[in-house]
Amino acid sequence: MNKVSSEQALGKTRKMKTLILILGAHAAGKSTLSRALCGASAQEYSSVVGGERVRFTYGQNGIALAGNRKSGSDGISQMEVLRQTVSLLLENREIVIVDGFRCSNRFVHWLQMLAVPQLAVLFVYLDLSLEANKARLLERRRANGANEEVLPARTHRNLLRTRVRAWRVFDYAHLCYTRQPRAFLVITESSTPDQAAARIWNELANMQSGGQEIEMPASIRNVA
């Protein structure tokens, strides 16, 4: 893994910056989608931000993920450190992904007030049926060594809470986030990660009115 200082991670600010906020329940596919957006050649870096050693990922076409490739933004333990990391990455990259489950209405409000003059934000909600969500979570738990036929009652209750939480944040953003440009995208379980990534790249291109052009990576262009 490459290590860089906070100063090395800083760079010249471009006219337009874009943030992608991916929202969804546990096991909805947030980290998988982030990996598809970053591309197979993405590399992780680490730096000390706010007193915490954090990992972030640089991917294709000027994109960065605030977090590591495995667990995404949830790999950053403190929300204040996540916010500092996002600010740092926006100085250096054109597009920044945040996919942490702990993102809340307060994080949306923070984006509203963020001192980045030209900031485009794409809010993405991963819409899975409850049965599909349960199946994915059960598959993940089995891969981690759990010998289960059904989800434990407590895990099931927690899953239901995460589904409500993710939707409420997406709905709050739709009602209360007023900066422009902004866009909202709902992706259903019928889309593969590459198809979902292609839809996001297309939406980003549609959002651009001035600033730099955003080009869909060749690796996923054929699934658009």
Image (spheres, rainbow, N blue to C red):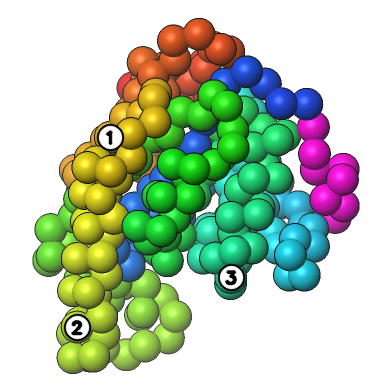
Amino acid type at circle 2 is Arg
Would you say residue 139 is visible in this rendering? yes
Pointer 1 and pointer 2: residues touching (CB < 8 Å)?
no
- Say which residue label 3 marks: 78
Disc with the residue nearer the chain's start (1 vs 3) = 3
Above or below, 140 against 214 in this view is below
The x, y position of residue 185, in whole percent, is 27, 35
Q: Tag 3, which secondary structure?
A: loop
Separation of residues labelled 3 and 2 (CA atoms): 24 Å
Residue underneath mark 2: 157
Residue 97's place in the image compared with 195, above or below, is below
Three-letter code for the amino acid on which mark 1 is drawn? Phe
The crowding category of the residue bearing disc 2, from other C-alpha atoms within 10 Å (few below 14, some 14 to 19, many at least 20), is few
Residue under label 1, please give it: 184
List the single residue furthest toward the top.
210
Query: What span is in magenta?
Result: 3-11
Q: CA distance from mark 1 to mark 2?
A: 28 Å
Residue at 69% x, 59% y is: 55
Badge 3 amino acid? Gln
Mark 2: secondary structure:
helix
Q: Position of residue 51 (x, y in %)?
A: 77, 70
- The disc, 1 or 2, on the residue closer to the chain's N-terminal end is 2
Comparing labels 1 and 2, the label whose residue is closer to the camera: 1
